[in-house]
Amino acid sequence: MKMNTKMLEKRIEILQKIDELLLKCDCVASFESESCSNCKEITDYGRKLLRLVNKRKAKMENSKTLKKSKVTLTKEEYLALKNVNKTDKEIAKLCNVSLRTIKNWKRANNIVVERVNKKR
């Protein structure tokens, strides 16, 4: 994933400030950090860093468009076709999609059908 320049600069700036504070901080145990001003500042910068990353994730998730299924069948229609001995390959041809699309659609819709071997 590509991080934009402005966000990368902000991230580097926050990490540099955290590094500077870590050099000043002498805390060893967690109970010491509760009263340490450096540790409190480090925590604040950590939160800023998380917000920065989460904001980026939120933007990415919003920009993703959900793929609409190419398969126009309902589960019931699919099962009815299977009951009249149609293969997935034949069903894919009827729906004008690939066999892989039918298999992905079945997985997404939790459809499990017993395999029946046809004699050729």
Image (cartoon, rainbow, N blue to C red):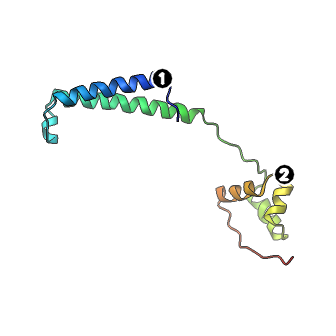
Amino acid, disc 2: Asn
Where residue 96 sits in the image (x, y, percent)? Answer: 84, 51
Relative image position of residue 56 (x, y in whole percent): 48, 31
Is 78 placed above or below 10 here? Answer: below
The picture places residue 31, in percent across and down from the top left corner, at: 14, 40
Q: Residue at x 48, y 23 (%)?
A: 5
Q: For mark 2, give the secondary structure.
A: loop
The residue to which callout 1 is attached is 5
Residue that appears at 72% across and 47% down: 69
Q: Residue at x 66, y 59 (%)?
A: 107
Q: Secondary structure at mark 1?
A: helix
What's the CA distance linking mark 1 and mark 2?
43 Å
Residue with the mark numbered 2? 96
For marks 1 and 2 on the same chain, the one whose residue lies earlier in the sequence:
1
Question: Residue most toward the bottom?
Answer: 119
Q: In the figure, residue 60 lies in which quadrant?
A: top right
**In the displayed structure image, the side of residue 86 where residue 50 appears, left or right:** left
Nearest the eye: 81 or 63: 63
Q: Nearer the viewer, residue 14 or 71?
A: 14
Q: Is residue 49 left or right of residue 55?
A: left
Please indicate whether residue 58 sits to the left or right of residue 44 in the image: right
Q: Residue at x 77, y 58 (%)?
A: 99
The type of residue carrying mark 1 is Thr
